[in-house]
């Protein structure tokens, strides 16, 4: 069962070039078989991880858009959810939490997260991948149980919540929002867009662009109060984050609010990257102005200490340490401006 789980997890997560679970002709039957047989299999962490990944994808990803027989998707998801909350996993998770291997401890924390509740109407779900497999955190959007991005776009995944959720706030001025970009690049294989606008007490999604021609995407209308509540709850929810992701997000916001912090060294902020499989660190990337343009990357370690103290230390180093010294060691001259 562990091997079957790994195979299905691989199919679910492998989406490049349009392949993956959608190209697996027996996907529905195999997912159903796994959900049934895993109930009596030996409880090990890899098996639980596969069940979690499949349940996430059935709720909000490409697996939820397969050609399921009537009622079979819901029944398979119920079976997986029952498996996931079984007390059989408690000794497995307890052992994993006490492991000397940090990756095993991160997986235990990921596997013990709160059960997902997806309501009718408009819903937002942040999907975090298995730390042992890596991958990007995705903002899954659902309308009456339909995974909108998975239904409309097959060349890439939904954007990360830090970027997408604030953009989805509805105003009277219509705004086009990019929900997903191709794994390669938008200029290569496209992106999925929708226009979001507030019309009185209704939020309207319309004018889809970049979607599959046969996708079940139309004009959607949501009660504004419910829509606003779902977006704000998702923006405020940090329960899915690990400390390095939280610290990276706080640093990114600080650098956005205070461009002079890097600007004093003739540098501009580019991005931060906190990966689920590297939870003891994150990357800060910034650019030197002028020509040649130099990109700097700083790997910032994160420990179990107070995040505010760690953020203060990072900011202080950025304030005091001039990156030009590193550029000069590489043989680059620093601009005079």
Image (cartoon, rainbow, N blue to C red):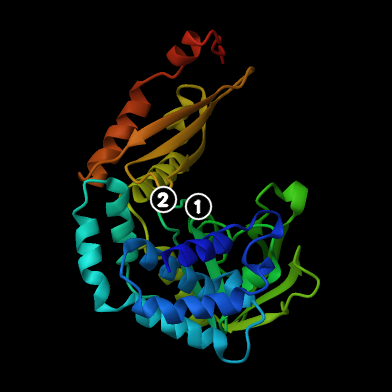
| Front in this rendered view, residue 52 or 196 | 52
- Residue 190 visible from this viewpoint: yes
Instruction: Point out residue 287 in the picture as x, y percentages from the top left corner.
Output: 54, 28
- Look at 44% across and 39% down and name the residue there: 255
Element on which disc 1 rests: loop
Looking at the figure, which quarter contains the C terminus? top right
Q: Are marks 1 and 2 in contact (CB under 8 Å)?
A: yes
Looking at the figure, which quarter contains the N terminus? bottom left
In which quarter of the view is residue 300 placed? top left
Left or right relative to 223: residue 253 = left
Q: Where 323 sits versus 201, above or below?
A: above
- Look at 40% across and 48% down and name the residue there: 277
In which quarter of the view is residue 155 placed? bottom right
* Pointer 1 local density, CA inside 10 Å: few below 14, some 14–19, many at least 20: some
Element on which disc 2 rests: loop
- Look at 30% across and 69% down and name the residue there: 43
Q: Where 250 sits versus 111, above or below?
A: above
- Residue 227 visible from this viewpoint: no
Mark 1 / mark 2, whichever is N-terminal: 1
Question: Which residue appears farthest toward the bottom when viewing the image?
Answer: 70
Residue 135: image tag: 1
Residue 2: image tag: none
Instruction: Point out residue 285 in the picture as x, y percentages from the top left corner.
Output: 49, 33
Left or right relative to 94: residue 322 = right
- Look at 43% across and 66% down and name the residue there: 50
CA gap between label 1 and label 2 equals 7 Å
Instruction: Point out residue 259 in the picture as x, y percentages from the top left corner.
Output: 47, 35
Residue 276: image tag: 2
């Amino acid at each position: 069962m562990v091997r079957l789980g790994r195979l299905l997890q691989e199919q679910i997560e492998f989406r490049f070039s349009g392949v993956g679970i959608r190209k697996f002709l027996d996907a529905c039957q195999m997912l159903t078989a796994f959900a049934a047989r895993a109930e009596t299999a030996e409880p090990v962490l890899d098996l639980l991880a596969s069940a979690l990944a499949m349940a996430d994808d059935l709720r909000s990803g490409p697996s939820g858009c397969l050609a399921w027989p009537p009622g079979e998707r819901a029944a398979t998801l119920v079976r997986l959810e029952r498996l996931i909350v079984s007390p059989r996993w408690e000794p497995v998770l307890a052992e994993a939490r006490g492991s000397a291997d940090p990756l095993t401890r991160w997986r235990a924390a990921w596997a013990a997260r709160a059960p997902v509740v997806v309501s009718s109407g408009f819903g937002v779900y942040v999907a975090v991948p298995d730390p042992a497999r890596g991958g990007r955190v995705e903002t899954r959007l659902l309308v009456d149980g339909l995974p909108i991005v998975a239904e409309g776009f097959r060349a890439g995944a939904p954007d990360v919540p830090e970027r997408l959720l604030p953009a989805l706030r509805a105003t009277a001025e219509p705004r086009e929002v990019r929900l997903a970009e191709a794994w390669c690049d938008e200029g290569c294989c496209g992106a999925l867009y929708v226009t979001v606008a507030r019309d009185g007490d209704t939020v309207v999604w319309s004018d889809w662009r970049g979607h599959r021609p046969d996708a079940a995407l139309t004009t959607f209308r949501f009660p504004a109060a419910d829509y606003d509540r779902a977006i704000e709850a998702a923006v405020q929810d940090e329960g899915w984050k690990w400390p390095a992701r939280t610290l990276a997000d706080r640093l990114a916001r600080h650098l956005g609010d205070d461009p002079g912090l890097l600007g004093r060294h003739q540098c501009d902020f580019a991005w931060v990257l906190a990966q689920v499989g590297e939870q003891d660190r994150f990357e800060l990337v910034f650019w030197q102005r002028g020509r040649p343009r130099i990109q700097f990357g700083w790997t910032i370690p994160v420990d179990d200490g107070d995040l505010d103290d760690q953020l203060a230390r990072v900011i202080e180093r950025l304030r005091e340490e001039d990156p030009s010294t590193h550029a000069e060691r590489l043989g680059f001259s620093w601009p005079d401006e």
